[in-house]
Image: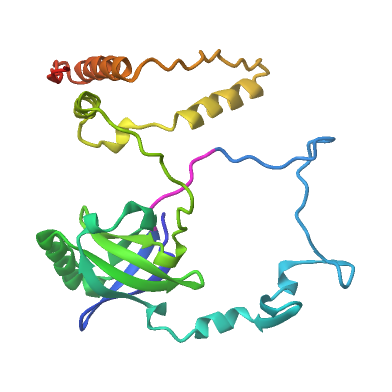
């Protein structure tokens, strides 16, 4: 059974809603281990102290912040519990905003929030109010030794909490740029037609991790002692842009017909 990794309360004005937090996603990639290629034995990862010329364990280490070369401010684990911030046990909602106002570059993780028994009524009220207003709560909460900027939004009959980067954590794009090129009207019209032809409602179960599936097949082949063959990849040809767009529209219409059993005819723009 999934266990909550954090317990606290949502602070909503003067209302406090006791909740539990759960991790909402996981990495499903196959697990690989480093092996000594001479004997295929898993090597042990050890900590070595160069000063004392000895191997140590995690029980022998403390956390240190290097404030000058070779000089450290040392912290014990229990001292991190004394960091004087309100958000250590509180999801402190500071404002509300439309989610479309938040660029996706800021999001990086998702968690589920479940109310404690005494918080079901105010939790439900907050969720329904967010649905009614179409807004999300912007809050801060501390766990894993940092204060996270987060976004709370309704999800089914609970709330989800999405971790967000602070503005200073988003790297500037620097000299990453696109040279200016003139786009012709007929090219734009064809591109819009292609996007329209490929448009359909997002359904998460339609997408599979094909790399993982292929890797699973390779693992099974290895176990059975079969030879792994690599399929030939045809070279990428670059046809002229208009021909590529037109062919793409035809392929998208065909794919739409195979999915729905209906022909979705996209009117092609008049090309002068």
Q: Quadrant of residue 121?
A: bottom left
Question: What type of secondary structure mainly makes up the magenta span?
Answer: loop
Residue at 50% across, 32% down: 212
Image quadrant containing the C terminus: top left
Image quadrant containing the N terminus: bottom left
In this picture the colour scheme is rainbow
Q: Residue at the far right: name it.
A: 53
Find residue 147 and report its horizontal and vertical position in percent.
43, 73
Residue at 40% across, 65% down: 167
Magenta span contains residue 51: no
Pick whichever, 38 or 229, lies toward us.
Answer: 229
- What's the magenta region? 23-29
Magenta span contains residue 28: yes
Residue at 24% across, 58% down: 101
Pick whichever, 169 or 219, lies toward us.
Answer: 169
Find residue 175 and report its horizontal and vertical position in percent.
48, 50
Q: In this view of the protein, can residue 267 be seen by the observer?
A: yes
Q: Quadrant of residue 89?
A: bottom left
Q: Looking at the picture, does residue 198 appear above or below residue 17?
A: above
Q: Quadrant of residue 68?
A: bottom right
- Report whether 128 appears left or right of 188: left
Find residue 152 and report its horizontal and vertical position in percent.
27, 63
Q: Looking at the picture, does residue 153 appear above or below residue 193?
A: below
Q: Looking at the picture, does residue 44 appear above or below residue 149?
A: above
Pick whichever, 35 or 232, lies toward us.
Answer: 232
Find residue 155 and report its horizontal and vertical position in percent.
23, 54
Q: In this view of the protein, can residue 166 be seen by the observer?
A: no
Pick whichever, 73 or 156, lies toward us.
Answer: 73
């Amino acid at each position: 059974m999934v266990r909550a990794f954090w317990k606290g309360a949502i602070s909503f004005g003067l209302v406090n809603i006791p909740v539990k937090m759960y991790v909402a996603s996981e990495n499903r990639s196959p697990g690989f281990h480093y092996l000594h290629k001479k004997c295929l034995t898993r090597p042990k990862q050890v900590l070595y102290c160069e000063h004392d010329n000895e191997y140590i364990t995690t029980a022998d280490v403390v956390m240190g912040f290097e404030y000058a070369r070779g000089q450290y401010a040392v912290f014990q684990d229990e001292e991190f519990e004394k960091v004087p911030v309100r958000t250590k046990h509180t999801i402190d909602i500071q404002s509300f905003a439309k989610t479309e106002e938040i660029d996706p570059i800021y999001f990086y993780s998702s968690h589920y929030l479940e109310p404690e028994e005494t918080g079901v009524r105010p939790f439900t009220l907050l969720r329904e109010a967010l649905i009614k207003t179409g807004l999300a709560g912007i809050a801060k909460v501390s766990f894993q030794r940092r204060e996270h900027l987060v976004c709370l939004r309704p999800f089914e009959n609970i709330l989800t909490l999405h971790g967000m980067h602070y503005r200073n954590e988003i790297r500037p794009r620097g000299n990453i740029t696109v040279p200016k090129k003139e786009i012709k009207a007929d090219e734009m019209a064809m591109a819009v037609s292609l996007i329209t032809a490929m448009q359909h409602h997002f359904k998460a179960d339609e997408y599979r991790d094909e790399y993982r599936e292929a890797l699973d097949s390779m693992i099974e082949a290895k176990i059975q002692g079969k030879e792994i063959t690599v399929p030939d990849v045809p070279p990428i040809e670059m046809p002229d842009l208009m021909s590529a767009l037109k062919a793409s529209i035809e392929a998208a219409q065909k794919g739409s017909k195979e999915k729905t059993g209906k022909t979705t005819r996209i009117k092609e723009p008049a090309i002068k």
